[in-house]
Image: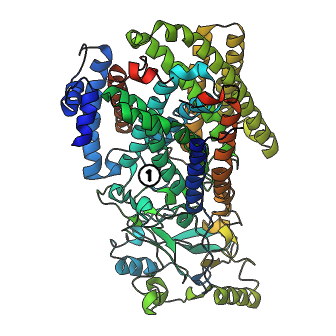
Amino acid sequence: MNSSRIISADNDGKHIWRFIFSELKPKGKWLTPFNIISIPIILLGIVLIVIRFWKGIGAVTNLSQEIPWGLWIGFDVVTGVAFAGGAYVITFMVYILNMKKYHSIVRVTVLNGFLAYLFYAGALLLDLGRPWNVINPIIGNNFGVSSVLFLVAWHFLLYMIAQLIEFSPAIAEWLGAKRAHKILSGMTLAAVIFGITLSMLHQSGLGALYLMAKEKIHPLWYSEFIPIMFFVSSIFAGLSMVIFEGSISHKVFSDQISDKDHKAQRGIVHGLAKICTGTMFVYFFLQLLVFIHQKHWGLINTPMGYWYLLEMIGFVFLPMVLFFYSYRSNNLFLIRLAAILTMLGVVLNRLNVTIIGFRWDMAIRYVPSWMEIVVTLTVLFTEIWIFRWVINRLPVLRESTSFAKVKE
Amino acid sequence: MQLHRRDFFKVMGATGITLALGKELKAAPDAISKNEFHGILYDSSRCTGCRGCEYDCSEANNLPEPIPSKEIKGPRKTDETRRTVVNEYNTSKGKVYSKFQCMHCNQPACGSACLTQAMTKTEEGPVIWRADKCMGCRYCMVSCPFDIPKFEYHSANPKIEKCTMCFDTRVQKGELPACVENCPNEALTFGTRRELIHEARRRIYEKPDVYVDQIYGEHEAGGTCWLYISPVPFKEIGLNTSIQKASYPELTKGFLYSVPSVFVLVPALLLGIQQATSKDKPANTSNHE
């Protein structure tokens, strides 16, 4: 009780719970196009989730004994987490390399990353057959330390905590808690260092999950270097997401963003495009090396081979050249186009490893059911709802509250 | 470089956390038990395809009765209602039968994949599944090269079904697995893996014209407790011959071994870079916020 009184005293004398309650109410218009589309899908998704827990996973998904992981793992978790990679890259640039230029996008990127982990890793619970046992690897019933999934599970949990600490000063500002703000800000660097290390390991870990499925994945996508590929591609996947999300946020939430930050955006996007070019070149070169070393020339002239070429040339090489050209010519439109192409390429790559190339030789292929897609959209839309709620209330895009700014 | 008291504590804190977790995440596979693994030798030249083992298996494990032989069309796979199947193959030497079930690998992929050790290799040899630990993630199914663990997709409380070599119900009490005990043609032999390999070799040497000179399971997937000998090449009786000789957990070993070193080296490197890049600022403003 005592601490809540201190916080409430900071917050213009308002009682803390009354303040939070008042913030829960919706702000602004209700009937926006996004709401009209997302509300029915979310309601339908909730019904499907109830059916899934009542009748079993088979009632809503097209999964089979041979293909046990489908859209919910391949897209929601594996692809979603790659796109959340922006958070560790941006915090690395701002807090470790001290590139102050990117400071204004740290909070929104970390928030995005945190929500992505919360929802996409949370979506994992829908895919677990026996979700009530989900705490077993945490409480030691048992510690399956030889499992890559054990590492990934622990890292998801720890990284979510690290991201929450990185984001917590914004929460403290929102609640007007000066002392908490000071303490939490002091923990940022430790959380960042810890978070980057965790990210390196679990971004690659998601690829390492598939190492034991050696004969099940098409040889053009399977190599012992999957973990490294997943890690390197998470860098430009995350940054492309930052560029994409930034261009939308600057339109939708333009009232939140100061003129100074608005002008800085161009320079930020420009810088990110440069980094994307570099990392995509490394990635493309690594893929080329693996391809040449594995001597898979014979596989190129097959349908899967053309598909592989489309991914590598159309969605890695082309956006890489586009990034290079657009940052040289300082063309913001082309940078955004390159970012979108890159994102499509990452989706394609992750789905090729996890779904399309997985058991490519089977007579009956896995195609996600419409219900799996609706549940995926439900997860995605709910995340955007929460994101919007936070942006409209917490100092994320907006400048920090006065007491927090003095310190900088 | 000037190191402030506060910075020092930060460094020590970060190092401490790293070391503590580094230990926990160490991922060496458990040492192989000194006890001998037990297994089963299946001789497909002796099997007459009576499917008695299928019936005995479902009775012993409370599964639905197998479908009658006349309803069978083509080779079947095990599923969540049957832990073993016997298939008929038209081969270069006429009709030959083959029995499928879990191979009980010496170093099982499913067991190393399982993050709760619900799927585990017992010291006696059988690979078993434990309901109170399993969270139903199905990573064992993704990893198993033989596609053995089967999941009850249409249940709100789904189980993983697979052959356990009757470990809990019979083998632990000193009885034979149900399929072995009731096989009328002695196509199945239970024993230690070492004895079974000797026995398989003896049969091959004594009748070289009957058998193919190979034991399936001796080296496949790093060795399995279930062993096969056959009068025809194993490919002809539906066995997966693209299985690698090394064990499957070996494939993730390199990645898992790198984890502790990453956890020690990367934070130190990051802190070093952070200190180096903030050096150009006056010492009294070296706070990072």
Numbered-mark total: 1
Q: Position of residue A82 (x, y in %)?
A: 55, 36
Asked if residue A117 lies left or right of residue B144, the reply is left
What's the colour scheme? rainbow
Residue under the image location 23 percent in, 21 percent down: A26
User: B28 above or below A331?
Assistant: below
User: A347 above or below A207?
Assistant: above
Name the residue tied to disc 1: A64
Q: Where's the N terminus of chain B, which quadrant?
A: top right
Q: Position of residue B27 (x, y in %)?
A: 60, 63
Q: B21 or A5: which is nearer to us?
A: A5
- Within 10 Å of disc 1 (Cα), the crowding (few <14, some 14-19, many 20+) is some
Marked residue chain, label 1: A
Q: Position of residue B159 (x, y in %)?
A: 37, 64
Is residue B93 visible in the rendered image? The answer is yes
Q: B17 or A14: which is nearer to us?
A: A14
Residue under the image location 51 percent in, 36 percent down: A188
Is residue A361 visible in the rendered image? The answer is no
Q: Position of residue B255 (x, y in %)?
A: 66, 54
Q: Tag 1: residue type?
A: Ser
Asked if residue B211 lies left or right of residue B113, the reply is right
Residue under the image location 54 percent in, 54 percent down: A151
Q: B117 or B184: which is nearer to us?
A: B117
Asked if residue A235 lies left or right of residue A7, the reply is right
Residue at the farthest bottom position: B174
For residue A176, what is the image quadrant? Answer: top left
User: A12 above or below A120?
Assistant: above
User: B137 above or below B281?
Assistant: below
Q: Secondary structure at mark 1?
A: loop
